[in-house]
Image (cartoon, rainbow, N blue to C red):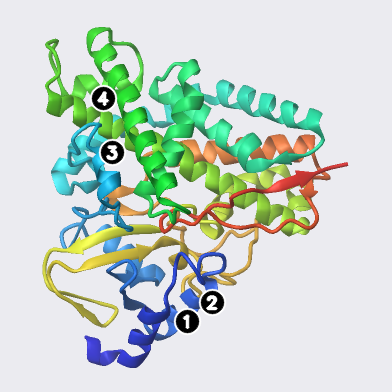
Amino acid sequence: MSDSLDELTQESLGSIYDPLGEHLEDPWPFYERAQATAPVFYSPVIKAWVVTRFADVRQVLRDGEAFSSANVLRPLVPFGFRVILVLMRGYRLQPPLLMLDGEQHRHQRHPYAVGFGADRVDALDDHLTRTAAQLVAEFAAAGSADLVKDYANPLTVSAVCRLIGFAPEDHRSLGDDTRLAAGLAMGHRFRSTDEKLEAARAWVRSQQLIGRYVRDRRAHPREDMISHVVSNFAPGEGRLTAKQEAMLAGELFGVTIAGHNTPSAAIADGLFHLLRHQDQWRLLCERPELIPGAVEEIVRYCTPFHIFLRKTTRETILAGQRLPAGAEVAVWLAAANRDRSAFERADEFDVTRSSGPSHIGFGVGPHFCVGAALAKREIATTLRLLTERFPRLRLEPGQRISYVPSLSQRGPVSVRVVWD
C-alpha cells in the first residue's frame, strides 16, 4: 500500500527520473536507489508506474491476468500529427501478437515460435558463420572497425532476414528502414522533426515491402517463415483481405525489427564491456569453453531491451504500492538484471558467473522472446570468431561511448576497435 512507502521519496524519484537525459548513459545508480527506497514509483515522463526490482518484474511478466499486455506498443513518446499523417499512408494498424494475452496470444505466437525454433536456428548456423567471417575479413583489411556499423548491424540483419525468408537483395534496405522505424516504436529521442518524419517514411516503406512478400507467398508459398505465417493466419488460397494483409505485414515488420535491433545492441555493448575489462577478454581468449556463460552474462549485464509496458486489469498491490485498475506499468528489465537483492556482485561483469537466478534479459513468462535462441547463437558466434582472430583486440583510445537515445533499447551508437 502507498502508506507503506516513503511517499516523498517516491515523488522525488518520479520527478527527477530522466531516462532520455541524465539517466541515459549511466542509469544504474538511480535504479539502485529506486530498488532500495521506492521500487515502484510513478514517472510523469513515460506516464507509467516504473518497476525496478527483479522479483517484482518477474511477478508482473508472469501474471498476464493481473497485468495485461494490451498497451505494450503504446508509444512511449507521442508521434505527433505530422508523423501520424505519414504513417497513414501505410497499413492500418492491427492488434499484433505482443498485445495479446492468454489463449489468443498462445495461438498467435505458435508459428513464430516454430519459425525461430532450435532446428531453424541450427540450419542457419553455416550462413551465420560465413556472414560473420566475411564481415570480419572486410574490416580486418581496413585495420580498424566500428563494431556497430561494420559488424553487429549487418550480421543480425542478414541472419533474421534469411530466417524469415526475405531475398538477399532486400536485406540491406530492409535493415536500414526497420532500424530507422524502430526509433518511433522504441521511444527514440529524435534530433529534429525531419528526422522523425524520415523514420515514419521508413516505417511505411518497410511495411510495404513486407506486404509484397506476404502477397507473393500467398500466391507462391515456399518453405520459409513468411509462408508458414500466412498459411496459419489466413488459410485458403483466395486473395488476402486488407485486414489480413495488414495484420501479417505488421507482425512480420515487428518481428524483423526485434530480430536485428535487440541482438545487435547486445553484441555491441557486450563487446564494449569485454574489451573495457581486458581481463575478461583475455580469459575468453584463453578459455573458449566459457563462451556460453559469457553470452548469458552479456544479456544480463547489457540487457538490450530495457522496458515492457503492462496495464493492470484490476486493483492490485505491487511491492507495497496500490495500483488501480487500468494503471500503466513499465517493468525495467535492465534494472532488474542488476538488482543486488537477486544477483551477487550484480554490478560486476563476470563471464565466469555460474550462480544466482536466471537473468530476464529476454523477458519471462508467456511473452518470453521467441528470438532468444537466435540472439544467443549470434553472440556466441561473434565471441568465438573474434577471440580466435583478434586476441589482442582493444578499444580505440580516446573514444567516448554514447548510447542510442531510446527508452526501450539500450545499445551503443558506436564502438571503435583496433588491434595489433
Residue in view at x 52 percent, y 57 percent: 300
Residue type, numbered disc 1: Arg
- Where the N terminus falls, by quadrant? bottom left
Judging from the image, what secondary structure is the residue with disc 3 in?
A: helix
Residue type, numbered disc 3: Val
Residue in view at x 12 percent, y 14 percent: 236
Q: Count the marks.
A: 4
Judging from the image, what secondary structure is the residue with disc 2 in?
A: helix
Residue furthest out toward the right? 420
Most foreground residue, 260 or 118: 260
Using the numbered discs, state the Cα–Cα distance from disc 4 to disc 1 in whole angstroms.
Answer: 44 Å
Q: Give the image location of residue 34, x and y in percent.
A: 42, 79
Left-right relation of 34 to 133 = left
N-terminal-most mark, 4 or 1: 1
Proximity of marks 3 and 2: CB atoms separated by less than 8 Å: no
Using the numbered discs, state the Cα–Cα distance from disc 2 to disc 4 in whole angstroms.
Answer: 43 Å
Instruction: State which mark lies toward you, 2 or 4.
Output: 2
Crowding at label 1, few (<14), some or many (≥20) Cα neighbours within 10 Å? Answer: some
Residue type, numbered disc 2: Pro
Left-right relation of 193 to 330 = right
State the residue position of label 3. 86
